[in-house]
Image (cartoon, grey):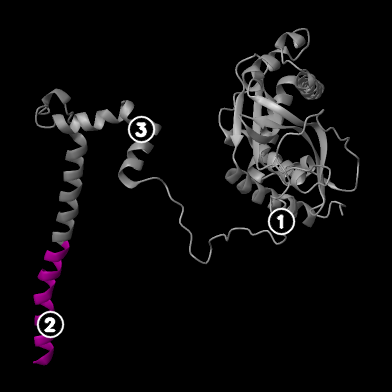
Amino acid sequence: MMSFLCINRKCWRVPMLLRGMLNQEGFRFRSLAASCSLYGKKKTTIRYENIDQEKYRDLINYLTSYKDSSQRPELVFEEDNMLNGPERKYKNSDQEDEPKVCRNWSPLMNPNKSSLPQETVPGPPLQISLQRKNLASVTAVLQQTMPVEQAFYLEKWKQRMILELGIEGFAEYTKNIFQQGKLFHAAMETLLLAEEISVEQEEDTNVSGYIRSVQHVLQHVTGVRVLESAVQHETLHYQGLVDCVAEYRGKLCAIEWKTSGKAKPFLRNTFDNPLQVAAYIGAINHDANYNFQVDCGLLVVAYKDGSPAHAHYIDSELCCQYWNKWLLRLEEYKEKDFGIV
């Protein structure tokens, strides 16, 4: 009886198994047929003229406007600055660079000279020859401690010039620039020593354009006290050769004459030249050969084509700022141990 029941149950399951297999096969067949029918149909093409242009007009204009001038990089940055403000680089408080402080700070002005008269003393300008001592020179300090970014652009310019002129051509170019600078300084010395400053005196030289360039500045230079004279800071042990000390518009200044083939209308365009002026001012104030003090500077950039020179006046407050920067560069130079006292 039990065996009959088992057989009966098995026989009842057979139709169910067959029905399941047929259903699976049917599903596969229908799927295959559907796939074939899809591949068999022609691809439907969408014609743009059938699109409701009026409905999507704003969207189309917005997308196509990306190719217009509104996507120029400068306008994108301008819009971003207007919306979000200028880019700011944030640092964690523990990662912020602390301002450098000079360990051996020295004042720009000499307190021992504060009571000395500042009036111009009649007589020829002071001209002291530069003695080669074991002291740091101002130009060497600035060259050896040049900021990395400034040195990078200087080297990049040098390599570009070598590609254009070749190594020998670049050497000749720098030689000519140096020679023109020497001739210009000599011509300025001659003019400032003369009783009357006249540009015609230098018309036959290679620097007549530079002289014409500074003519409007020379009209305000009076009371020349120093010309091409050596200065030495007796405490900080550095030396240099200052171009001129004279009154400019009634203010006693240390004056530096510079030449350039490129316009430098702003003081920031002159790189380390303001530090050079501040270094000379500090040396004058701490040199026993000079019985006066200076607290202002004048940086004059002359142009070969005769266009008006740019005269950058450096007042006493600005001089102090550049003086502090000079002290840091001098300290960095001495830390590198360049064989100075």
Is residue 328 on the magenta stretch? no
The residue at 12%/82% (across/down) is: 7
Q: Where is residue 282 drawn, in percent x and y?
A: 72, 46
Left or right for 136, reference 83? right
Amino acid residing under circle 3? Leu
Distance from disc 3 to disc 1, alpha carbons, whole Å, reads 48 Å
Mark 3, other Cα within 10 Å: few <14 / some 14–19 / many ≥20: few
**Where does the C terminus fall, quadrant-wise?**
bottom right
Q: Which quarter of the picture shows residue 43?
A: top left
Q: Upstream in the sequence, badge 2 or badge 1? A: 2
Mark 2 sits on what residue? 7
Q: Give the number of the mark in front: 2 or 3.
A: 3
Residue stretch in magenta: 1-21
According to the image, label 3 marks what residue? 75
Q: Nearer the viewer, residue 175 or 303?
A: 303
Three-letter code, disc 2: Ile
| The N terminus, quarter of image | bottom left
Most common SS among magenta residues: helix
Residue 159 visible to an observer of this rendering: no
Q: CA distance from mark 2 to mark 3?
A: 87 Å
Taking depth in this image into account, of 333 and 10 the one nearest to the observer is 333
* Disc nearest the viewer among 3 and 1: 1
Q: Position of residue 249 (x, y in %)?
A: 61, 29
Identified at 20% across, 44% down, the residue is 35
Q: Which residue lies under the disc numbered 1?
A: 106
Query: Is residue 112 at least partly visible in the picture?
Result: yes
Q: CA distance from mark 2 to mark 1?
A: 115 Å
